[in-house]
Image: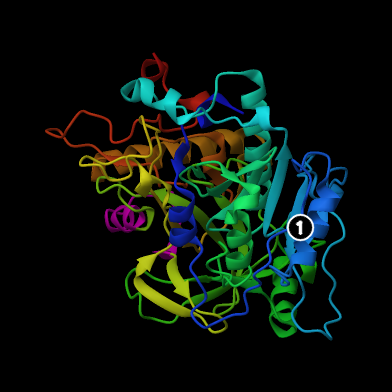
Amino acid sequence: MSFDFCDKFVGPMPVQDFLDDFLPLPETPAFRPQAVFEFIEPSVSQNETKFIQAIHKSGTCPGLHFVNTTSKFDTPSGYPYKPDISVYLNPPGANSCAQPPTGLEWGRIEFYIENKPKPYDPFMRIEQLQTNPQDVSCHVGFSAGAYKTCGQLIAYASAIHRSQFRVFSFSIAIFGDTGRFLRWDRSGVLYTKPFKLADGELFQFLWRFDHLSAVDRGHDTSVSPVDDDEAELALPKLKTYPTFEKVQRSHLHKMLVWDDRDRHEKPRCYITPSVKWATDALIGRATFGYIAYDVESGNLVYLKDYWRIDHPDVQREGDVYGELHGAHVPNIAKMSRACDVPQISGRGALQVQWPQVQRTRTQDYLSRPGGAYSWCPGHPRVEPYIHHRLVLETVGMPLNHFKSTRQLCEVIRDAIVAHTAAYNKTRILHRDVSAGNILITDKGTGMLIDWDLSKKVKEDGDANPRRHSRTGTWQFISIARLL
């Protein structure tokens, strides 16, 4: 586990509160088996197959398929991780030709179960956390074993969020005869108090999860597979982009983007192949950049999908572009549209719930004055984020695709001109200039992109930082700011 993740754990949340807040009961009556698991082993350790057999025999969650993946890697994904039990959806319908995975497939996992001996529970006991609550930010025990266990849990959750279009995800960690539920989002992770496997909470989780919609399971349903007609339109155009010559239909997804200027307008559809620029980081902005086909215009565009910090003093990137264009700042991309991704409910057809948007929830459970969520001692450092998408009409190539030293110098000069003009005309500082944020246009000129961390300089403004974390790419941050 990396050091910068240790203060992202919020808990220990009461188990019943976790179930009620995140796994709502079915709206319509559903068959609910009364039997508990017939699992007589004192712990699950080294008994994953027997544990899976007990779950299937109980009839608790017929819609879920459990696979022992203790020794199975997902080779195509490239991730060298293998959770003990991977959980998938069973194909709907008895006559379905589709089959659930028999091994490890990160792109299809609904949640994972990690199985450790009892001493490997990484979280501090509540008595330890309450000893000096004002000084506590990390809830993980200070031992190599605790950090290793948390590192595994984080790696598995990161692989899910990197391989799927996710708002959040769940997991279960078992330690001997006890377990904990976890919920992961871009802000941090909520973890529960330990529960006994024989007491029914695990039964409750699995039965409830089996009845959740895709939205409540954490999927971003504003992204969907393409149909044959859409693929036939998009592929010829996408293959004109350098390095996309071998793009196939199986790589494509359809992504919806609304417009902040008129949220009730029908969203625009963009067809994207696999992500072009991405991060494996689970916590934070999680920026994914796509070269996308605009179904309406027939052109290629740049689509940026990321989680923006939810802070009143942090300007949305679409608004920044609007201000820069209004001031005629040169060498910046032309923006088509930008909007927070709306909350979508229901099964089947999309039901958009404006003004609700996809946002993190971990930060909502920090302790509050007056006793709210007093079960979370100390001060974990988690920040609120909102899912945001932005579309730029100007498509560029990475800086390292320069054709000559002269062009490299001219492109960097163009970025400097954009940065200078933005400050002089609008008092906006970019604050994240790096090689990855300077692109080469099809005309061979340079442009400065990624203004989501920018800040308007106010002569009489508050000098205090807006966030506790450092902003920027550390290799390019000024030495004065790092001292």
Residue 431: x and y in percent read: 38, 35
- Residue 333 in magenta stretch: yes
Residue 319 rendering spot, x and y as whole percentages = 32, 57
Residue lying at 77% horizontally and 84% vertically, measured from the top left: 93
Query: Does dot 1 land on a helix, a strand or a loop?
Result: loop
Residue that label 1 marks: 38
Residue 98 falls left or right of residue 37 = right
Residue furthest top as drawn: 483
Amino acid marked by disc 1: Glu
Give the quadrant of the C terminus.
top left
Q: Nearer the viewer, residue 79 or 364?
A: 364
Crowding at mark 1 (Cα within 10 Å: few <14, some 14-19, many 20+): some
Q: Position of residue 378 (x, y in %)?
A: 36, 29
Residue 93, compared with residue 126, is above or below; it is below
Report the side of 218 relative to 263 (left or right): right
Q: Which quadrant would residue 321 be assigned to in this image?
A: bottom left
299 over 306 or under it: above or below: below
> Observer-nearest residue: 247 or 43?
43
Closer to the camera in the image, 282 or 427:
282
Q: Which residues are magenta?
A: 319-340
452 to the left or right of 255: left
Question: Is residue 75 among what the camera can see?
Answer: yes
At a point 80% along the width and 67% down the height, the residue shown is 248
User: Image quadrant for the N terminus?
Assistant: top right
Residue 334 seen in this snapshot: no
